[in-house]
Image (tube, helix red, strand yellow):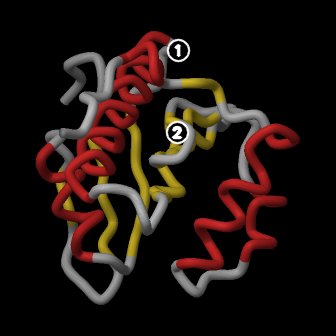
Amino acid sequence: MNKMIFIQDINNYEHEKHQEMVQSWLRDWNMDPQVTQYFPEYGLIIPDVCCLFLYETNSKTCFLEGFLSNKHQDKAKVNEGLDLIGDVLIKQAQEKGYKLIAGYTQRPVVADRTIKHGFQVSNKPYYFFSKLLNGDK
């Protein structure tokens, strides 16, 4: 039986500490592992499971990007982990005063995940997703 994921399983992404692990995930998904050099300063990771990043700006908009996972990890655990990290990052974006959180993807599964978390999503071939924060209209 797989262990449930809890908030205390989430760590801040530290490039030096987590880069090798995440690069191996990228290779497993046939993606360029060198993209880790472009990750922002802030992201969250559940080691051996998944990670997600918050790209901060000097405006009222931030971006949710880098939905990455361990291809060899249990799919239910990855889904649970990405949902939990996403919820934490959305809450932190609100606490930091951002009014809009957005992102884009080519992957329908990522677009579907964002819809589940209240984002509005445009149509393909690129899915742009956004969500107003702090109750703004």
Q: Which one is nearer the viewer's eye here, 12 or 2? A: 2
Q: Nearer the viewer, residue 101 or 136?
A: 101
The answer to whether any part of residue 132 appears in the image is no
Q: Which class describes the residues within 10 Å of circle 2: few (<14), some (14-19), or many (20+)?
A: many
Q: Residue at x 44, y 68 (%)?
A: 71
Image quarter of the N terminus: top left
Q: Give the residue type at disc 1.
A: Lys
Q: Considering only vertical position in the picture, is 99 above or below 97?
A: below
Mark earlier in primary sequence (2, 1):
2
| Residue drawn where x is 33% and y is 19% of the image | 6
Cα gap from disc 2 to disc 1, whole angstroms: 10 Å
Q: Residue at x 12, y 47 (%)?
A: 116
Depth check: give the residue in front, 1 or 89.
1
At label 2, the amino acid type is: Cys
Q: Please name the residue that numbered disc 1 is placed on.
A: 96
Total labels drawn: 2
- The residue at the far front in this view is 1
* Image-quadrant location for residue 84: top left
Q: Determine contact: label 2, label 1, CB under 8 Å.
A: yes
Image spot of residue 17 (x, y percent)? 81, 38
Q: Is residue 40 left or right of residue 94?
A: right
Left-right relation of 137 to 47: left
Image quarter in which the C terminus is found: top left
Q: Secondary structure beneath disc 1?
A: loop
Q: Residue 33 placed where, x, y %?
A: 74, 73
What residue does disc 2 label? Answer: 62
